[in-house]
Image (cartoon, rainbow, N blue to C red):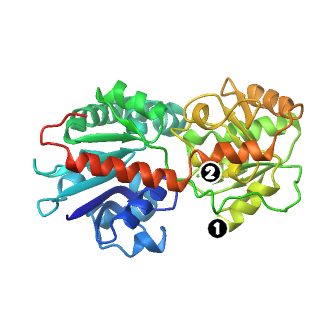
Amino acid sequence: MRVALVHDWLTGMRGGEKVLEVLCELYPDADLFTLFHRQGAVSPLIERRRITTSFVQHLPWAARRYRNYLPLFPLAVRQFAFDSYDLVISTSHCAVKAIRTPERVRHICYCHSPMRYAWDQFDAYFGPDRVGPLASRLFYGPMLGAMARWDAATASRVDRFVANSAYVASRIRRYYSRASTVVYPPVDTAFFQPGTEAQERHFLIVSALVPYKRIDLAIDACAQAGVPLHIVGDGPERGRLEARAGGASFLGPMSGAQQRDEYRRARAVLLPGEEDFGIVPVEAQACGTPVIALARGGALETVRDGETGILFEEPTPDSLAAALTRFDRVSFDRCRLRANAERFSRDRHVAAMTALIRETVEAPEGTQW
């Protein structure tokens, strides 16, 4: 069976790339298609693929500003051809779920999220505060409206949707009018384990520095509560965030081992934004570290309030600062934290995906999911 894997873009090892990495292990001979590939940005297992990129790869300044070419993505995905394959598996949070496959070729889409920019995070990326009121209203608004219509219209090209959380399954149902099967992303609980490092006073964020992560909210809340904050990661928002950082320390990108050490030393890991799933909170719990998270999205599935962390209700500095105060009054058991994280282990993900793919491939033609 000839298999093709399709991914939006290869620019770093985040949650979506962890799913792709598992698929590369399951199908070592599969070809990989992507809109844009930054050499060396992903793991050697993925880099060893035969990687086909779209014309976005060759556009000016694409290495740093590939998202600026969003209006061209519908055209870019059309250039990929899958006539010689038997199965196509896309891992998508933006555009590649819209690829066209021949009728005989099954297309499974592991959906990390319906297109965030077009549906419910427009203001975070293209709102008046980001691009100016005129550009937001006259250019980006109509453009993203068209992208949302395209995103919904192309959902029928997928034979079977897999959602990375129940929260995303509800969004797939709302925006695409499609059912989906939930398979949680893989968390390497064999690697992320409690250690012997002494716990320090600071709180921790491990995140890409992009608008919807709401790092600004955590910076303001920690300043209000008078507690130190360490931030691991990088991204286009770094300069703006450092300008308002106060007492927050920016540590930049780190290796997996360095991140693990940071998890172990922190009092708690903060998740101030609404996540579709959120691997970081699970990695932290696997290391025996509790989480303080906004009570929305995937955190409701990964964090147990008062047992493995604290959930706060409103995306405001006041609400998070109150959660930081509440945190000091709660005791957490490392064994419970670890047991909760094991629900999302890599082994469970592999077993679930293997069974789902086999079921999909062996299903009679015309099966509806």
Check disc 1: other Cα within 10 Å, few if <14, some if 14-19, many if 20+: few
Q: Quote the CA–CA distance across marks 1 and 2.
A: 13 Å
Residue holding disc 2: 207
**Front position in the image: 141 or 115:** 115
- The earlier-in-sequence mark between 1 and 2 is 2
Q: Is residue 223 left or right of residue 234?
A: right
Work out whether 2 lies above or below 44. Answer: above
Q: Are marks 1 and 2 in contact (CB under 8 Å)?
A: no
Q: Position of residue 1 (x, y in %)?
A: 19, 64
Q: Residue at x 30, y 73 (%)?
A: 50
Residue type (three-letter) at the residue carrying disc 2: Ser
Work out whether 203 lies above or below 50. Answer: above
Mark seen at residue 206: none
Q: Position of residue 164 (x, y in %)?
A: 45, 42
Q: Is residue 24 left or right of residue 343?
A: left
Instruction: Determine whether the residue tagged by mark 2 lies in a helix, strand or loop.
Output: loop
**Front position in the image: 257 or 203:** 257
Q: Position of residue 323 (x, y in %)?
A: 79, 30
Q: Which marked residue is nearer to the observer: mark 1 or mark 2? A: 1
Q: Is residue 215 left or right of residue 226?
A: left
**Number of marks present in the image shown:** 2
Instruction: Determine whether the residue tagged by mark 1 lies in a helix, strand or loop.
Output: loop
**Front position in the image: 164 or 123:** 164
Residue type (three-letter) at the residue carrying disc 1: Ser
Check disc 2: other Cα within 10 Å, few if <14, some if 14-19, many if 20+: many
**Residue 326 occupies which quadrant of the picture?**
top right
Q: Residue at x 56, y 42 (%)?
A: 211
Picture quarter with the C terminus: top left
Mark seen at residue 255: 1
**Front position in the image: 93 or 236:** 93
Q: Residue at x 53, y 55 (%)?
A: 346
Q: Position of residue 311 (x, y in %)?
A: 70, 29
